[in-house]
Image (cartoon, rainbow, N blue to C red):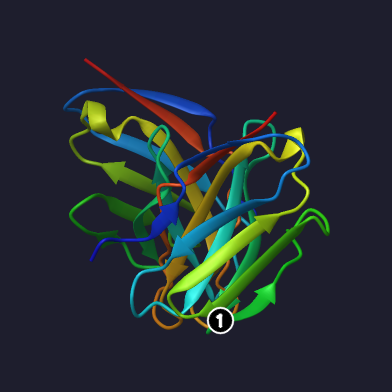
Amino acid sequence: DAGVIQSPRHEVTEMGQEVTLRCKPISGHNSLFWYRQTMMRGLELLIYFNNNVPIDDSGMPEDRFSAKMPNASFSTLKIQPSEPRDSAVYFCASSSYTGPNEQYFGPGTRLTVT
Amino acid sequence: DAKTTQPPSMDCAEGRAANLPCNHSTISGNEYVYWYRQIHSQGPQYIIHGLKNNETNEMASLIITEDRKSSTLILPHATLRDTAVYYCIVRVAGGTASKLTFGTGTRLQVTL
């Protein structure tokens, strides 16, 4: 298995632009998580899905952030409009709904908003 | 989920055992102890988890005290590639309560 796939790996954009991050979970996993990591705040959960349904989006910072999971093999995290304080590494992770729930993380997308 | 406390940093000589402690004095009966690590610039990696019995896999061993208020992750023969931030997380396994709450972890530096 290729593991969790994220794209792009690096994104540089200007303030005010729309940014879309993509994630393909491990096949057969039915939970998907979006995390953000910064030096100041560490690694924090933004939102997670079970069976394509958003379960907890309390970590989404504000309305500029939105996430979708149209099917079991794809999810997006969108920021519109982007701001410099959104600069961070965004990780996607997936896990199986049953069993010990260990999460498998992707390589992350490093976002820089200038 | 219960809160955990870890030392901010530790050093270990290559080839020696690295013992990383974690306190979780408010752990509930249905909560597991999970360990993840994050090597620089990579996504976190699952290492091991346990409920109350000691556990061992190809990466590490997990020792949980009888009262379950603390645990120790043991890397039996640390190598330079084990240099990373190690996170101890306590949470309920299974069901919908499956999110991870990461603290600040322990930064392990393995040296020659």
Q: How many numbered marks appear?
A: 1
- The quadrant in which the N terminus of chain A is found is bottom left
- The quadrant in which the C terminus of chain A is found is top right
Say above or below: A32 vs A43.
below
Name the residue furthest right. Answer: A63
- The residue sitting at 71% across, 40% down in the picture is A86
Say above or below: A1 vs A82.
below
- The residue sitting at 46% across, 30% down in the picture is B107
On the rendered structure, is B73 left or right of B96? left
| Residue B105 locus on image (x, y percent) | 52, 39
Identify which residue, A19 or A32, lies in the foreground: A19
* Crowd class of label 1 (few under 14; some 14 to 19; many from 20; radius 10 Å): some
Identify which residue, B55 or A100, lies in the foreground: A100
Q: Which residue is mark 1?
A: A52
- The residue sitting at 43% across, 72% down in the picture is A101
Say above or below: A70 vs A62.
below
| Residue B106 locus on image (x, y percent) | 48, 35
User: Dividing the picture into quarters, in which one does residue B110 lie?
Assistant: top left
| Residue A50 locus on image (x, y percent) | 55, 80
Dot 1: chain letter: A
| Residue A52 locus on image (x, y percent) | 56, 81
- The residue sitting at 70% across, 50% down in the picture is A18
Residue A30 in view here: yes
User: Dividing the picture into quarters, in which one does residue B47 lie?
Assistant: bottom left
Three-letter amino acid code of the residue under disc 1: Asn
Name the residue furthest top. Answer: B112
Residue B51 in view here: no
User: Dividing the picture into quarters, in which one does residue A76 lie?
Assistant: bottom right
The local secondary structure at tag 1 comes to loop
Identify which residue, B97 or A2, lies in the foreground: A2
